[in-house]
Image: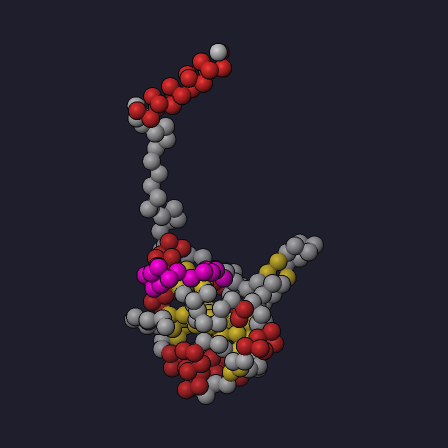
Amino acid sequence: MEESTSREKILKKIRNALIEKSDPPFPILDQESDVYPEMTDTLDVTFAQALVSMAGKFVYSESEDEFLGVLKSFILEKDWPLLYCLDPLLQSNLKEAGIPFESDPARITEARIGITRCESLIARFGSIMVSSKLNPGRKIVVFPEIHVVVGFTSQLVPGLKQAYKLLRKKYGDDFPSMVSLITGPSRTADIEKTLVMGAHGPRELYVFLIEDITHASA
């Protein structure tokens, strides 16, 4: 009988709580405001500084033609081997510029330099957002020793929230099954606290930022 009475008391309290609304014990959180301090530099400068601080390398070009010319110079100066590219849009640009590349999917594990596009460039962290919707998929950002990313100034965003808004605007309901962030070259210090570059992916990361007004990603 006592058990039944206790149960009834608990149920009565629950009913009263549902009927009589009370103010929440904690203030309502503002989920829209940015938790980070306002950036003082432009997006491109902020991105470049953050990328370099994470051991990435930043190259700016005023046009796609200039980018292709600079890329040619890099290949010669650094004695880079054949680029590996699976992106049809980049392949077309490389062909027009006379830059040879490898595109056989079966040889991806042998690739030393992979070149890809990106979804967005997150200025605050110097991070690159990629997704499964980009033609190369995930393998090309993992296997090569050197990863070359081609991005446009119109893809620069302050933070993650804006990056995901770009994705939603671009893909709508057909959202990518995989979204990932790349922040600097692959690294680990798990073994004897010694920093090792390229442990689980590329040991070098280059971002070529191209000036544009509006770039429609294919």
Residue 210's quadrant in the figure? bottom left
- Specify the farthest residue to the front: 1
Residue at 45 percent of width and 18 percent of height? 7
- Specify the farthest residue to the right: 192
Query: Would you place residue 166 above or below residue 85 in this image?
Result: above
- Can residue 156 be seen? no
Q: Is residue 175 on the magenta stretch? A: yes
- Can residue 138 be seen? yes
Residue 195's quadrant in the figure? bottom right
Residue 5 pos. (x, y %):
44, 13
Q: Nearer the viewer, residue 64 or 84?
A: 84
Residue at 36 percent of width and 72 percent of height? 218
Residue at 42 percent of width and 17 percent of height? 8
- Marker count (numbered): 0
Residue 13's quadrant in the figure? top left
Query: Would you place residue 88 above or below residue 121 in this image?
Result: below
Residue at 37 percent of width and 62 percent of height? 174
Query: Would you place residue 47 above or below residue 91 in this image?
Result: above
User: Seen in the image, is 212 located left or right of residue 95?
Assistant: left
Residue 42 pos. (x, y %):
35, 61
Q: Is residue 201 on the magenta stretch? A: no
User: Seen in the image, is 80 located left or right of residue 121?
Assistant: right
Q: Which of 83 and 208 is in front in this view?
A: 83
Q: How is the image coloured?
A: secondary structure
Residue 142 pos. (x, y %):
56, 67
Query: Would you place residue 164 above or below residue 11 in this image?
Result: below
Numbered range of the magenta stretch: 168-182
